[in-house]
Image: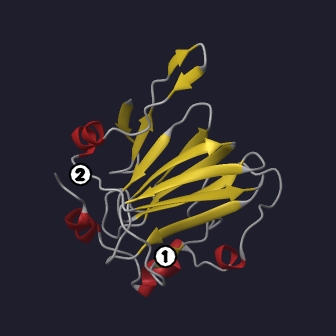
Amino acid sequence: MIITETSVRDAYRIVPEPIPDSRGRLYESLRHESLREATGHAVDIRQVNHTVTRRNAMRGIHATTLPPGQGKIVTCVRGAALTMVVDLRVGSPTFGHHEAVEQDAEAGVALYLPDGLGLGYVARADDTCVSYLCTREYVPGTIIDVDALDPELGLPWDLAEPPIRSDRDAAAPSLAEIAASGALPGYEECLRSYPVG
């Protein structure tokens, strides 16, 4: 696998190298030691989630408060999604910056996002399934929501029509509003939370 840092500091793209045979292909989706060498983080998976989403439905931008935090490795295992990573760490050199990543089941590209980085995606196909490997178990009431259509963020969704969103996502505050509320984690606080190993 090839692991490279994105333009958002501490967010990594994981590109598997498929091994084909007469039956199809094998993807090595995650190798603990390779990820640790590339990121410096000893990632320990504590919860696994899957979302199933219809075409043109949008999820996010979501992150988790510190504490407890919740890092993620996110892969599209069926269908296709345009995924956005947004730096929500106040004081980060890339605060408010984003990285757009096309993810689909064919390529198997994954994203590793430690604490303080927000995630959202729009499904490009019906029945798109996204897998989340999470570093901590979910704690109710700890989700940070940011409006994925915030004009100041300017995320390049390339939408042909208005997306389908949950009421919660549609009512999410802008990045400036949530930053002013004090709900976002600080950059140094996030760095201290990363599982160094």
* Image coordinates for residue 150, horizontal then vertical, percent: 62, 68
Q: In terms of secondary structure, where does tag 1 sit?
A: strand
Could you tell me the amino acid type at mark 2? Ala
Q: Nearer the viewer, residue 134 or 168?
A: 134
Image point 65% across, 46% down: which residue?
Answer: 81
Circle 1 is placed at which residue position?
144
Image point 43% across, 40% down: which residue?
Answer: 13
* Image coordinates for residue 48, horizontal then vertical, percent: 47, 59
* Position of the N terminus by quadrant: top left
Residue 173 visible in rendering: yes
Question: Which is in the foreground here, disc 2 or disc 1?
Answer: 2
Q: Return the mark for residue 42.
A: 2
Q: Is residue 14 above or below residue 121?
A: above
Asked where in the image residue 21 lies, by quadrant, the reply is top right
Give the alpha-carbon distance from disc 2 to disc 1, as whole Å.
24 Å
Q: Nearer the viewer, residue 63 or 138?
A: 138
